[in-house]
Amino acid sequence: MRPQYLQPGDTIAVISIASSPSEKQLAANWKEQFESWGLKVKIGEHLADKIHYDFAGSHELRAQELTKMVLDPEVKAIVSIRGGYGTMHTIKYLDMEIFRQNPKWIIGYSDITVLHFALQKIGLESIHGAMPGTFEPGFDGFSQNSLKDALFGKTKEYTTPASKYNNHGQGRGRLIGGNITLLRNLLSTPIDHNWDEPTILFIEDIDEHMHKIDSKMWHLRETGVLAKCKGIIVGYFTDIADQDQWQCSVYDLIHSYTRELDIPVIFDFPCGHEFPNASIYLGREIEINVDENGGRITFLP
């Protein structure tokens, strides 16, 4: 299922699905930015709530706020103001059939990976893209325009330069993934992806140690996930500690797992916890092509 693309005059809701936003994130110019795209903005009643461990309200309350926006006929898209932690705890309070009956774009990344998996489990596309908490002075125009293009249905493909880590080849499958930490945590849970389905895997992460990334890649290999993929897209791995001690970069480490796969692999894809942050349609079938000139991903109709 694909939600309807937005048009000028539509309403986008901004809520907190995971952690509570900071004062800086609340004060960022996201409302003005969305309005400049011709959109109306509806702000969640509990957007700035904060309880223990920085949750934006109780797990049940956050799920209720999300459900309320899904059922609101005026709202055509819902974006989490930030990620953080806690999305996994909201899933038990969500009736996913409501999302199926009222398909609309859900946007976010990082911890929102959990919700993306739940949506893809019911066959609903979503957008891995910039969140309003990053709409601050100095925020790059590419990321903003990329999110706008995705919401308005203008995103068709991305190209990347050649990388020494790439695997050449062609592949086709449904684009699944996000933050590798959350992805690994979701394996064998009720909302885990059906990896027997032709799949293109996207991964990214932030603020981890090399041995943690190694263990995640090892787990994906040993569970057979990597071998089942028809292609892999590697985004940003930001602020990864201990690379000096390991005497290699985090991308060298990931490449040690992907180079043995007979599938196309794209490194240096601009998506994740850095700028520019490209918005991508998760749950959609894509084609991936990689050769000596670089990589290309094409979102299929």
Image (cartoon, rainbow, N blue to C red):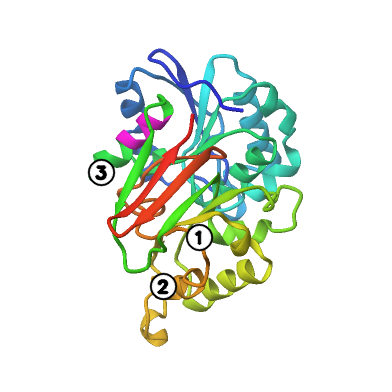
Q: Quadrant of residue 217?
A: bottom right
Mark 2, other Cα within 10 Å: few <14 / some 14–19 / many ≥20: many
Q: Quadrant of the N terminus?
A: top right
Dot 1 falls on a residue whose secondary structure is loop
- Residue placed at 27% from the left, 40% from the top? 142
Whether 66 is drawn above or below 267: the answer is above
Q: Position of residue 31 (x, y in %)?
A: 36, 28
- Nearer to us: label 1 or label 3: 1
- In magenta, the rendered stretch is 145-150
Mark 2: secondary structure: helix
> Which circle marks residue 250 in the picture?
2
Look at label 2 and name its amino acid. Answer: Val
Q: What kind of residue is marked 3? A: Asp
Q: Which residue is mark 1?
A: 263
Q: Number of numbered discs present?
A: 3
Front residue of 40/96: it is: 96
Q: Callout 1, which amino acid?
A: Ile
* Image position of 127 (left or right of 130): right
Which is more toward the observer, 22 or 224?
224
Height in image: 199 above or below 3? below
* Residue 234 shows in this picture: no
According to the picture, the residue beneath numbered tag 3 turns out to be 140
Q: Position of residue 55 (x, y in %)?
A: 58, 49
Q: Earlier in the sequence, mark 1 or mark 3?
A: 3
Left or right, 19 with respect to 148, comes to right
Q: Nearer the viewer, mark 3 or mark 2?
A: 2
Query: Secondary structure of the magenta portion, mostly?
Result: helix
Query: Which of marks 2 and 3 precedes in the sequence?
Result: 3
**Magenta segment includes 146:** yes
Q: Position of residue 7 (x, y in %)?
A: 41, 16
